[in-house]
Image (cartoon, rainbow, N blue to C red):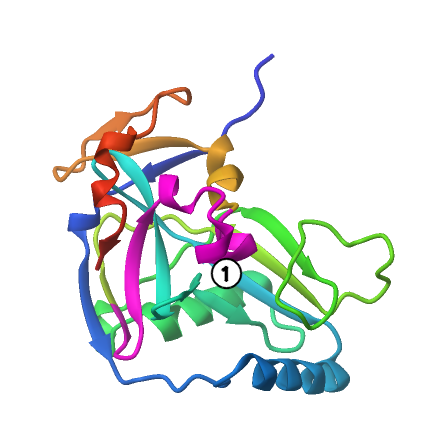
Amino acid sequence: MAGRQTNVTLHPLANYNFGSKAEKVEKDATLQERTTRLKALYQQQGMRRSVEAILLVHQHRHPHLLLLQVNASFFKLPGGRLRPHEDEVAGLKRKLHNTLSPEGASLVTNWEVGECAATFWRSGFEPAMYPYIPPHITKPKEVKRLFLVPMPERCYLAVPKNVKLVAVPLFELYDNLPRFGMVISQIPIIVSRVRFAMANDQSAVEKRPSDAPTLGSEQQGDAQGQA
């Protein structure tokens, strides 16, 4: 009997409108400042809990992941730290609203959070995260859960002026640890169990076989689309 496979419909990147809103000041200017802040929070609240969204669209019939680009070399998924005792789904909706919703109330997206796709653990205060708790670690410093969040057919997204929203194809993310880091570079593997259906501009759906080939190397000139 065949195993169950998650089905996700991806809509074209061109379906979405993008804008900006007031700048958001980053909490840390350096890695040392971040480490110091994380240590202080751990002493006050214990293990950090964070949630992030896997938001996918398609371009040229290939899945693209929406990422926040903070500077030339730092990318992150939409999401962030949960408040103490906050529900994961409610917290992720709050983060998506704060990060991606425009300032006009009539344009706000009602996000529907899907299944948890992966869990990563931080053993100390260094950047490295693992998809397991290392055997010698009894008190991990952070647990991060990634959720599949289906994009609505159309919506308006707005990010702070000092942040870019970029759509990066899975073939550029795959195993690209130096550019995207441990977690993001593994997302192509995390979503490999998903069967994508590519919707066109008229909202018709074209199902993509699970074994269909991805874009060839000759097409990688369009490796990164920016919104």
Image quarter of residue 85: bottom right
Q: Quadrant of the C terminus?
A: bottom left
Please tell me which residue lies in front, 17 or 188.
188
Q: Which residue is mark 1?
A: 52
Judge from the rendering whether residue 134 lies leftward or rightward of residue 114; answer left or right. Answer: right
Instruction: Give the mark count.
Output: 1
Residue 65 in the image: state x and y as whole percent: 36, 50
Q: Residue at the spot x=67%, y=53% of the render?
A: 130
Image quarter of residue 99: bottom left
Judge from the rendering whether residue 133 lies leftward or rightward of residue 56; answer left or right. Answer: right
Residue 196 in the image: state x and y as whole percent: 36, 32
Residue 142 in the image: state x and y as whole percent: 68, 67
Disc 1 residue type?
Glu
Residue 144 in the image: state x and y as whole percent: 61, 61
Image quarter of residue 112: bottom left
The magenta stretch is 158-185
Q: Is residue 146 magenta?
A: no
Please tell me which residue lies in front, 103 or 32.
32
Judge whether 170 appears above or below 143 on screen.
above
Circle 1: element type:
strand
Please tell me which residue lies in front, 163 or 112.
163
Residue projecting furthest to the top: 1
Q: Residue at the spot x=59%, y=67% of the render?
A: 50
Residue projecting furthest to the left: 202
Q: Is residue 173 magenta?
A: yes
Check disc 1: other Cα within 10 Å, few if <14, some if 14-19, many if 20+: many
Judge whether 105 appears above or below 169 on screen.
below
Q: Residue at the spot x=38%, y=52% of the render?
A: 55
Judge from the rendering whether residue 161 lies leftward or rightward of residue 5; answer left or right. Answer: left
